[in-house]
Image (tube, grey):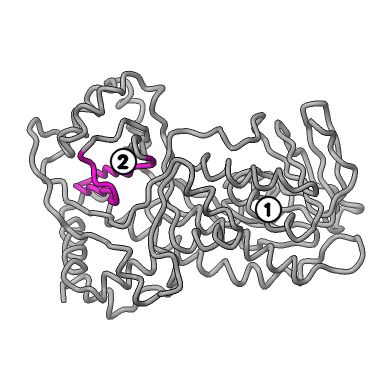
Amino acid sequence: MPSPPDTTEVVIVGGGTAGLTLALALGRAGRQVVVLERDKQADGANGPPRGEILQPNGLGVLHRLEVLPQVAAGPNAHLRYYHFRRITAGKHSTVTTPSTPLCTFDYAELSQRYPDQLCTTVVLLPQELNRVLSRAADHLPNVQRIAGTRVTGLLRDTPDGPVCGVAADGPDGPFTINTQLVAGADGAHSRVRAQMGVAHSVTPYPEGYLTGLIPRPDDFPKAGGYYYLGRGEILGLFPVSGDTLYFFYLVATDDLKKIQTAGIAPLKVRMAQIHPQLTDSLQSLTEWDQLSFHPCLKGGAGQWVTDGAVLLGNAAHAVNPHTAQGRNLALVAAMTLADRLNGHWPQGDGPIAADPLHPYQAACQAGAEQMTRMGDELVLLWNTANPLLTFARDRGFKTMARRASLRQRVLAQISGMDQRPLSLWERIRLGVGV
């Protein structure tokens, strides 16, 4: 592994989707970039069993970066349909009861409104996306990635001065790098953000997801995924390749130890009750090590930019996975930041001032905050065991099933094509079923 340079133009802390996207976009513009990655394996191969939906806004970024063919060539599933169904049997039922349809979202319906966009989704494991981005970045001689590195601090010439570098512990010991810009893409619990001293919040939701991978049943739809919603219960099923199915099952964080103590068998029984075609595939699950618990949280920083430093991805904003937008927002933010930097790179070699980067925050923050509010609303309606709220939720889905204009409006919002919140009239229509 090459030694860290003493000086570079940009240091990106975090080698996930946001950091790799920024590195690739800046590197192709000729900037000298160093990516510091905490994991020792810097090829994008790490990560728990988890599927990600690449929405049209995220796919648009990958298209601009000219890596969409490489993503399509790897393990993935192109999904056009998302079927929402109601779980009719209670959590503790001992019989299999057929679920009832609520609404199907068809991404092809967006083509009339957005004829120039990629009106589809791609579902894959996030490490597959990061592997494509990292390989593309590795082909650039001006981009260097250093794995197994922990950032210990930000450098300043004076206590109140601009950020001018990073201090880190690497595989060969501590080192420092002087730079014009430090980009913090190091997650919801960002060390860069803490060192910047900006106000922020990270709030966990009461529920998270048990996630895992199983063989894809032969009769599972080729272009569709399922959301099953019950009273305090959610099961999601998405293919992530031709032979692999990703699942997520809602559990209260406080109940996790009790569920694990009961063993994996009750979970398998319940999933098979909800979707009987999983019965054979679930035999591949034999121990808890095959599953992962994914806690859900939201968070954000009020200030994304300071002199010499900037935040992106979950370090700047984190949203509930119900929105299916977290990774897509990271892609869009990274590309927006790269466009701003490439178009307004300052003269000289000093730290980049915050003022030229404020338009980046202005362009991305409103959409992230809207998705946070949307995530809160979905948690309230989707996760609830309250019979009145589940009735309202189900009525809203059934209204969308009947009303194409409402269905397409909500789908445009979820897909990232329309960031406007639903109007009061649209909410009333969903609530009363008109």
- At label 1, counting other C-alpha atoms closer than 10 Å, the crowd grade (few under 14, some 14-19, many 20 or more) is many
Identify the image quadrant of the N terminus. Answer: top right
Identify the image quadrant of the C terminus. Answer: bottom left
Which image quarter: residue 418?
bottom left
Q: Is residue 376 left or right of residue 201?
A: left
x then y, percent, for residue 319: 47, 54
Range shown magenta: 219-241
x then y, percent, for residue 149: 73, 34
Q: Residue at x 19, y 47 (%)?
A: 230
Does residue 400 lie above or below 171 as drawn? below
* Amino acid on which disc 2 is placed: Leu
- In the rendered structure, find residue 250 and report the number of the disc placed on it: 2
Q: Which one is nearer the viewer's eye here, 254 or 89?
A: 89
Callout 1: helix, strand or loop? helix
Q: Which residue is mark 1?
A: 24
Q: Which one is nearer the viewer's eye here, 44 or 301?
A: 44
Callout 2: helix, strand or loop? strand
Q: Which one is nearer the viewer's eye here, 49 or 308?
A: 49
Q: Is residue 199 left or right of residue 288?
A: right
Does residue 137 lie above or below 255 as drawn? below
Which image quarter: residue 291?
top left
x then y, percent, for residue 388: 16, 58
Q: Residue at x 38, y 40 (%)?
A: 241
Q: Residue at x 61, y 47 (%)?
A: 133
Q: Please tell me which of labels 1 and 2 falls first in the chain.
A: 1
Q: Is residue 292 left or right of residue 168?
A: left
Cα separation between marks 1 and 2: 35 Å
Instruction: Please tell me whether mark 1 or mark 2 is closer to you in this view.
Output: 1
* Amino acid on which disc 1 is placed: Leu
Which image quarter: residue 355?
bottom right
